[in-house]
Amino acid sequence: MQTPYPADYHATVQQVVRENETGYLPPLKTVIDGSNQYDFVFVGFPTWDMKLPPPMKSFLRQYSFRGKTIIPFNSNGGYGPGSTFQTVRELCPQSTVLEGFSTRGGLERDGQLLAIKDARAEEVRKEVESWLKTIGMLK
């Protein structure tokens, strides 16, 4: 993004709520050259306000993914992916969007914002491996 979100988590949450209410799509700072050379595009994002983050909406609108296979994956604060995967499908109507993967990255209601480490990291690694096999990306 051209203007980063606030460092304070709660301020970011409030800003995202406003952006989602107004449909604001923040301009992106980074340009990805040669995105048309890829057949498969993994798109990773957190759940923000039970929705796809506004910068991800900007990204999916900015590039053409026509004829590509989109593979979404998500981390969330304990509430699940919300409408994120459906929004990816809506923003990529000319793409094949595979089954997404979502994992709990923390437990927001308990103040644990990111906790994929130690035993949890191994558990998530196994979940990702299983998902990749299920969608045919790993044998």
Image (cartoon, rainbow, N blue to C red):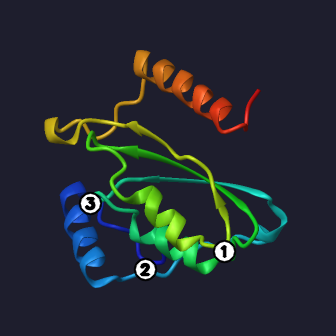
Rendered location of residue 56, percent (x, y):
49, 67
Q: Please report the residue visible at 29 percent of the width from the left and 57 percent of the height from the top.
A: 50
Mark 2 burial class by Cα count in 10 Å: few <14, some 14-19, many 20+: some
On residue 49, the disc is: 3
- Quadrant for the C terminus, please: top right
Residue 29 visible in the current orientation: no
On residue 31, the disc is: 1
55 is higher (above) or lower (below) than 133: below
Residue 30 visible in the current orientation: yes
SS assignment at label 1: loop
Q: Report the mark closest to the observer, 2 or 3.
A: 3
Say which residue label 2 marks.
Answer: 26
From the viewer's perspective, tell me whether residue 55 is left or right of residue 30: left
Report the amino acid beneath label 3.
Answer: Asp
Distance between the alpha carbons at the discs numbered 1 and 2: 14 Å
Report the amino acid beneath label 2.
Answer: Pro
Rendered location of residue 24, percent (x, y):
36, 83
